Image: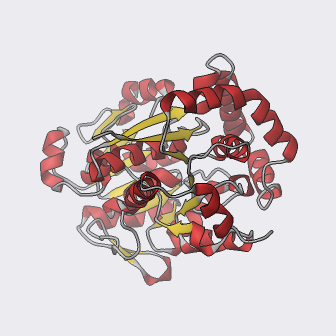
Amino acid sequence: MQKKRVLILSEGFGSGHTQAGYALAAGMKEIQPNVHTKVIELGSFLNPTVAPWILSAYRLTVSTNPALVGMLYRKQHDKPLKRLTALALHKLFYNHTADVIRQLRPDLIVCTHPIPSAIIGRLKASGLDVPLCTVITDYDAHGSWMNRQVDQFLVSTESVRRILLKRGVHPNSVNVTGIPVHPTFWTKEDKAAVRRKLKLKNMPTVFIMGGGWGLVANKELFYQLAQWKDRVQLVFCVGNNQKLLTKLKSSPAFSHPNIVVIGQTKEVSKWMDASDLLITKPGGMTCTEAMAKGLPMLFCESIPGQEEKNCEYFVSGGYGEVLSPLVLDRWLHAISTGGTATAPHGFRMSPYHSVPREVYRPERCAEELVELLNARTAGSRPAELRRSLWASM
């Protein structure tokens, strides 16, 4: 039997978009093993010399001038990519992307970032007859995601769906699936057993992480946490922040049997299973992974824009709180005594809380893509489908 082929395109602006792509690839193969997937960060793949400079400049802007990032996000929130921008992307990537598609011959193209979605959209407008599915990987829908050539949008929540409908997308072309997570997050391991695997003590545990780019040092937070080290086990995951990794490992204040410092890891699922509380930036992927595990969260250092929207969603739903010294001490006391903590809106979060499957089912996004893929290989025509799904604008 010939394998069905899915091309998943992303970009490296933050780690979440590509992480979602790999989660979808693994999830689809879990559901239907004869699916062949290929995940590509399009800019880095086609321009390996220029792309690292662009990504480095973006990262520097986020870390040194987050207010500017937030201002630009809000200013452009309801606007699609400018025609000039779309044309520039078209000129830069059109021929190379078309060559990739001709070589890989995908039955379905999935985009987890607006830029490759815009590029594929231009190709489809020029005659490419492959279905395009765009997966919005945050709890908001910036205007840059909008593209009339998209055959199906998969979104995180009903509120994001309403944003797309307001912009003219037909209801049948938007499905609320939740943000995809890797199949390792679809289930939970026994807490005591996974702690043994990770060589942790079987005691109340806090997992502190800051996304793929690494946790930004917060001296006050770190030292407040360290004051609890005799009663709570602390796991600091600093990603690829080698400077902070070295600093924490060499500091006498963090040299304690109940403090563990790790760098980049592929075992986030296990570390979450071992933990009773997560302290993190409100990135869409990390928070969705924690929600899938039923792990309560405390949020710090939101990047203005989409991370603020993510934070609003999880706080309003009762899955986490905004970090403060009082909130932190309340939670550390709660988990160290086996209790619960009362969050805003009266929701009582605890490390033993499970998210109702009607609210979030982690495998649903991958299931939807498998259905779309099977419909494509059964002979559907995406151009006709798209014309019927989009409302007039």
Q: Determine whether 383 is above or below 88 in the image.
A: below
> Farthest residue toward the right?
84
Viewer-side residue, 298 vs 248: 298
Q: Count the numbered circles shown.
A: 0
Viewer-side residue, 252 vs 188: 188
Q: Determine whether 225 is above or below 321 in the image.
A: above
Viewer-side residue, 64 vs 204: 64
Percent x, y for residue 130?
A: 56, 46
> Farthest residue toward the front?
379
For residue 391, which quarter of the picture?
Answer: bottom right
Q: Quadrant of the N terminus?
A: top left
> Farthest residue toward the top?
49
Percent x, y for residue 51?
A: 66, 24
Whether residue 209 is visible = yes
For residue 334, which quarter of the picture?
Answer: bottom left
Whether residue 201 is visible = no
Q: Residue at x 30, y 71 (%)?
A: 353
Q: Quadrant of the C terminus?
A: bottom right
Percent x, y for residue 60?
A: 69, 32
Q: Residue at x 50, y 59 (%)?
A: 325
Q: Is residue 158 left or right of residue 205?
A: right
Give the image's coloring scheme.
secondary structure
